[in-house]
């Protein structure tokens, strides 16, 4: 039995009030398997919050569905289970704030700027920008999610800068200031590259399929560093 089936069997038919059942099932069904528990918690967070984001925006485009599948390359025989969980979240009477608050507690090491929750936010950004534009309602949704995740405004701006289609401010992408000297910027860049290496994501329980996001993140960091380096050399 797949972990999707175990989770949904534990939840039962609770379309109107699924949140509590989902969180409790993750806590209990996978209690003796922390690695699977982390993977399930992360997957559910992406699925549930992307469902809530689609509801807040009012539109679910085909490209957004494709972006979702890029993150979760689940077997075809599990597609119905994933769709069922998505629909449970979308139909749930609980608002997205409640989902974000409860799902954030599944990260047992959660603290301000928790890297696992940053991974979740990156996944949501990936889906939101799939149609070529992050809409105002989506950005507001994502900003509020970050706030609930106890993420600083500076950290959120850094994440958002990585995803804007026109290419974000390279200093914001790296979380540095134009007044910083280049050795400081280089140390920050190298620290971020180490922090966001795909191997680190796997150790945090992020599914292997999430390499799409990891590659996007690394590309944004590399491009930002290259732009600053070029600017400093030209000065």
Image (cartoon, rainbow, N blue to C red):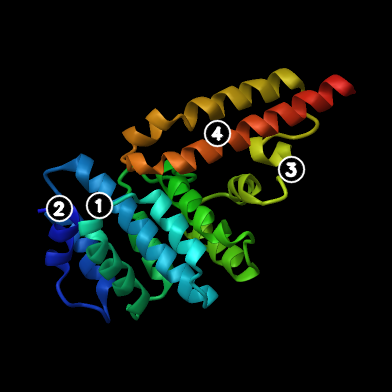
Q: In the image as oriented, which residue stretches furthest toward the right?
A: 235
**Quadrant in the picture for residue 17:** bottom left
Viewer-side label of 3, 2: 2
Q: In the image as oriented, which residue stretches furthest toward the front?
A: 76
- Report x, y in % for residue 208: 34, 39
- The residue labelled by disc 2 is 2
Q: First in sequence: mark 4 or mark 1?
A: 1
Viewer-side label of 4, 1: 1
Relative to 179, residue 45 above or below: below
- Report x, y in % for residue 158: 63, 44
Secondary structure at badge 3 equals: loop
Say which quadrant the C terminus sits in: top right
Spatial CA span between label 1 and label 3: 38 Å
Spatial CA span between label 4 and label 1: 27 Å
Q: How many other residues sit within 10 Å of disc 2, few (<14), some (14-19) or many (≥20)?
A: few
Q: First in sequence: mark 1 or mark 3?
A: 1
Secondary structure at badge 1 equals: loop
- The residue labelled by disc 4 is 218
Relative to 158, residue 125 above or below: below
Q: How many other residues sit within 10 Å of disc 4, few (<14), some (14-19) or many (≥20)?
A: some
Spatial CA span between label 3 and label 2: 43 Å
What label sits on residue 75 in the rendered view? 1
Kindly tell me whether residue 206 is visible in this rendering.
Answer: no
Q: First in sequence: mark 3 or mark 2?
A: 2
Return the residue nearer the eye: 159 or 72.
Answer: 72
12 horizontally vs 156: left or right: left
Disc 1 and disc 2 in contact, CB within 8 angstroms: yes
What label sits on residue 171 in the rendered view? none
Spatial CA span between label 1 and label 2: 10 Å
- The residue labelled by disc 3 is 169
**Quadrant in the picture for residue 35:** top left
């Amino acid at each position: 039995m797949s972990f999707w089936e175990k989770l949904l069997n534990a939840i039962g038919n609770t379309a109107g009030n699924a949140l509590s059942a989902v969180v409790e099932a993750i806590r209990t069904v996978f209690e003796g398997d922390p690695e699977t528990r982390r993977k399930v918690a992360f997957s559910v967070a992406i699925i549930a919050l992307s469902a809530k984001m689609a509801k807040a925006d009012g539109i679910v485009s085909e490209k957004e569905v494709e972006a979702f599948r890029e993150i979760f390359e689940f077997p075809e025989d599990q597609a119905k289970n994933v769709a069922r969980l998505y629909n449970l979240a979308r139909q749930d009477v609980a608002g997205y704030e409640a989902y974000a608050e409860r799902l954030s507690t599944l990260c047992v090491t959660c603290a301000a700027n928790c890297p696992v929750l940053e991974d979740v936010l990156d996944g949501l950004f990936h889906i939101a920008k799939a149609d070529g534009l992050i809409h105002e309602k989506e950005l507001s949704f994502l900003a509020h999610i970050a706030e609930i995740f106890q993420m600083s405004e500076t950290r959120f701006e850094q994440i958002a800068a990585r995803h804007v289609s026109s290419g974000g401010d390279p200093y914001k992408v790296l979380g540095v200031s134009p007044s910083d000297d280049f050795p400081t910027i280089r140390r920050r860049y190298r620290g971020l590259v180490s922090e966001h290496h795909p191997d680190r994501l796997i150790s945090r329980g992020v599914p292997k399929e999430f390499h799409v996001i990891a590659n996007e993140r690394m590309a944004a960091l590399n491009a930002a560093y290259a732009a600053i380096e070029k600017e400093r050399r030209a000065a």
